Amino acid sequence: MNLTTTRLALVLLSTISINAFAADVHWDYKGKHGAEHWGSLSSKFSTCQSGVNQSPINITGAIDASLPVLNIDYQAGRVDVVNNGHTIQANIATGNTFTNDAGSFDLKQFHFHAPSENTINGKSFPMEVHFVHADQQGRLAVIGVMFEQGQENKTLAKLWSKMPQKAGEKNDLTNLLNGKDLMPVSSDYFRFNGSLTTPPCSEGVRWFVLKDPISASQAQIEQFSKTMGRDTNRPVQDINARIIAK
């Protein structure tokens, strides 16, 4: 790996935490530090404004591409549940991977947005979970799963039982948890190139959004929204010249 690649890998890995630069640059979803101003808050965030492959997007006009199967191999493990001020994030033990034609990616963390960040044919969902992965070169890949309001989600109930109420707090989940239990049975997906959906909005992220939603109760969705105190979704970005495959 050459020096340029090494530097890029280090930058991307430093952004795996959704709150990577919060200590020195304040950002939010609304107001003077909101999404429309991210690009001007810091030179570190310039891609939020200048990027051409930004996420999230409205997933529409997807073309049939006979996509390869996502081989998701997650195991039950210990989880730290963190309130970082922008989301509830689950940091999970190593040993969880998915593989496809792009290679093998290790799960680093998963976190939530309400309402959903990506939309499908213009439809917004009440909540979305992002599973953030990295390969050995530091390249990132995100699997997105939509929630629709319905029956209580038992796996989500485990996480929410330890939901920290204040920014900066962390709780350990007593029981083991398998992230795959927050995914639908079908792994059919949409695929496109994009970015992180929070500052610094780094591009070069592979996105895999599963077509089928899973269920969460109204109370579970409201518990997350009440704890965060505001909507936690970046508005959809221009697709530009990107191709969305299905």
Image (cartoon, helix red, strand yellow):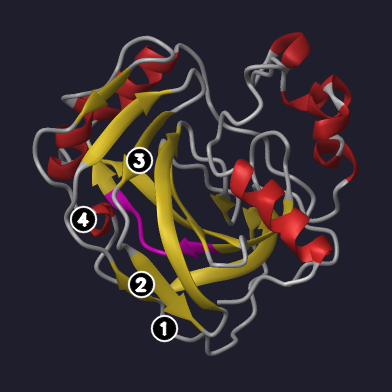
Q: Position of residue 56 (x, y in %)?
A: 64, 47
Say which quarter of the image contains residue 181: bottom left
Task: Give the CA distance from mark 3 to mark 2.
Answer: 22 Å
Disc ID at residue 187: 2
Name the front one of labels 3 and 2. Answer: 3
- Counting residues from the start of the chain, the first of labels 1 and 2 encountered is 1
- Counting residues from the start of the chain, the first of labels 3 and 2 encountered is 3
Q: Amino acid at mark 4?
A: Asp
Disc 4 crowd rating (10 Å Cα; few below 14, some 14-19, many 20+) is some
Q: Which residue is mark 1?
A: 69
Task: Give the CA distance from mark 3 to mark 4.
Answer: 15 Å
Q: Residue at x 72, y 10 (%)?
A: 31
- Counting residues from the start of the chain, the first of labels 1 and 3 encountered is 1
Q: Amino acid at mark 2?
A: Ser
Relative side of 117 to 167, left or right: right
Q: Amino acid at mark 1?
A: Val
Q: Which residues are magenta?
A: 208-214
